[in-house]
Amino acid sequence: MNHIRLLTCLFFTLLSASAAHAQDEKWGLGDFEVHLPPLFVQGVEQEIELECTNPGKFGASERILSVVINGERKMADFQNSNRVTFNVTFDRNEPLSIKAEGYTYVKRVRPMPLWLSILPPLLVIGLALLFKEVVSSLLLGILTGACIAGFYGVGDGGVLTGFMRLIDTYIVNAMTDTGHISVIIFSVLIGGLVAVISKNGGMQAVVERIARKASDARSGQFVTWVLGIAIFFDDYANTLVVGNTMRPLTDKLRISREKLSYIVDSTAAPVAAIALITTWIGAELGYIEGALNTINAGEHDVIQNAYAVFVSSLQYAFYPVLTLVFILILIFSGRDFGPMFKAELSARNTGSSPGAINQGGAERLEFEPHATAPRRMVNAILPIFIVVAGTVGGLFLTGYDAEIWNDTELGIGRKISITIGESDSYKALLWSSMLGLIAAVLLTVSQRILPFGKAVDTSIDGFKSMISAVVVLVLAWSLAAITEELHTADYLASLAGGNVVPWALPAITFVIAAMVSFSTGSAWGTMAIVYPLMLPLVWELSIAEGYDAALAMALFSNTTSTVLAGAVLGDHCSPISDTTILSSLASQCDHIEHVRTQLPYAVTVGAVALCMTLLTSAFQFFPWYLAYLLGIAGLYMIVRLLGRPVQSL
């Protein structure tokens, strides 16, 4: 009997041990899948994902497992999803080890040194400064980043795989993103619109109508300024149309070619940069959207869409706005200083100035009216009105919320802000630009200015004029993807942490953007380089310093504006800038004289704008409109102190 009892106990003991062993071995190799980031970076916390591919094994029990990751026990909660994420950090080469009961995963990890993340953007900036060319600089920077990512990546392809990813991953992804495609389509549609309303004589009619109001040097300069504001949608069209149209009149009124080219140049880019509907807006929104994606904008309620960020950043657009005001101060005070004073004095007394030259070929063909085109303003005003009104209508249509507009506690300004923030700006821009182009073509064909086929060809010529901008955009988006993958913002934040206070970053960004733009001669190229670097940096540093999301967003908006402002400043000062060169050509002014006379004015406004940027970023309570008033007062005092009246002898 005792033997039977002993055997029975032994049997049940073995059965229990077997069951326990079976429970330990419940999960096997095929029950989980581990998803890793493209590469690991030293010292940066990154996410890995554990996916249960056989959730049926959970049975009726609670879907929580004990998981050991690199020796640290964590709980994997599969109650709401079959995927669970964990944060890991690597400081050296070591294996990644994951154990979940009977499941084991081991992967040797070679984390990338964080300092390597700065090489691609540094290479882009260095090459751009050296060769004065943006496209090849961006391409080589992306290639360098792709090779680094391939060498340290979790895959087995190495540098060769990284090299191939340049085209099949980074550039393809940049061109297949829905927002990016919207930006490209909008940009080329606006390019086509500008070409059509130039060919049908509508733009020329607007210019000639306004020019009739000029009767003396002061009114002639003012009319030139008004035209520069009126042709807000494209800086090239602005420069070439205003310069070529106003040159005979300003010569008659004894306004120097240097002053004409300055007004033309200093209204073109500033207006195109800050106007709500321009050929620039697509690129600006693309860069802002990329930065918002980089900082995981969806996690913060204060961050809205790219268009809302752009609109909010305009309150800090000190350089573009102050430049436009500074021109008015010079015009109505009748004063100038520096080399410009000598040029103006010469023009008043002799009818000519040192920079006056006579040359042909200043016009670009896509902006020349057709030989038989009538001068009817409606042919330009109506399509542009459709674009502007259509964009506004599209923003309200896509962002309208009856509950918000029925809320009596909200002011009208707040309702509009919320509506724009919730709108789909890409749809609004696409709808309006398409309708505007269709209207321009129909007006042109219906008046028999051009046959339908020729009108379409003109539109396509306008599309082609935007190709270089699209190329820069695509490469810039690819660079942004590389810097995000390499965690460049984390490296910059680590350098700035404890050394640079967040409120100083907008001013620093302004200076950096101005230097890059001056050296490359490209405001667009500068935005492509600086936006992906500085926008994520200012956000990460602000959050790391303990700023709340609202304050971090204010600095983000300020930095958004200073990238653009610095790019325009450098563009104005650079002798290799495309718009600076076009301003000289359209005004038939010696190029070096144009640069020499414009430089003191641009630097003066830039210095005041930098002070206002520091003021609004260092003291968040300081209202932006008071900063503008203070900046305008400062510029007025500078003109009164340094300027001398330009009078004929």
Image (cartoon, rainbow, N blue to C red):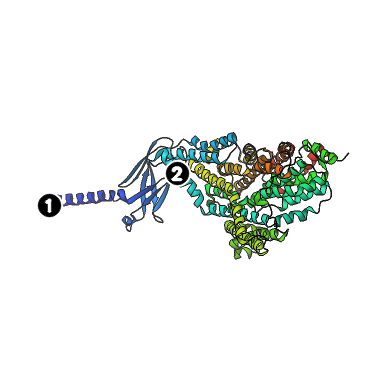
Q: Which residue shows up at 82% across the image and 49% down it?
A: 219
Of the residues tagged 1 and 2, which is closer to the observer? 2
In the image, 248 versus 269, the foreground residue is 248
- Nearer to me, 248 or 594: 248
| Within-10-Å neighbours for mark 1: few <14, some 14–19, many 20+ | few
Outermost residue, top direction?
130
Q: Which residue is mark 2?
A: 165
Quadrant including the C terminus: top right
* Residue 221 appears in the rendering: no
Q: Is residue 398 left or right of residue 639?
A: left
- Relative placement, left or right, of 30 versus 354 is left
Q: Secondary structure at mark 1?
A: helix
Q: Amino acid at mark 2?
A: Arg
The residue type indicated by label 1 comes to Ile
Within 10 angstroms of label 2, few (less than 14), some, or many (20 or more) residues? some
Residue 92 image label: none
| Residues marked 1 and 2 touching at CB (< 8 Å) | no
What residue is pinned by disc 1?
4
Q: Is residue 174 above or below residue 507?
A: below
Residue 123 sits above or below residue 469 on the image? above
In which quarter of the view is residue 600 placed? Answer: top right
Image point (49%, 35%), residue name:
116
The location of residue 138, given as percent across then percent down, is 54, 41
From the top left corner, tell me how far across and down residue 475 is, in percent. 53, 44
Q: Nearer the viewer, residue 18 or 296?
A: 296
Place of residue 525 in the rendered image (x, y in percent of width and height, measured from the top left) = 59, 42
Residue in the foreground of this view, choosing between 420 and 184: 184
Residue 436 visible here: yes
Mark 1 and mark 2: Cα distance apart in space: 71 Å
Question: First in sequence: mark 1 or mark 2?
Answer: 1
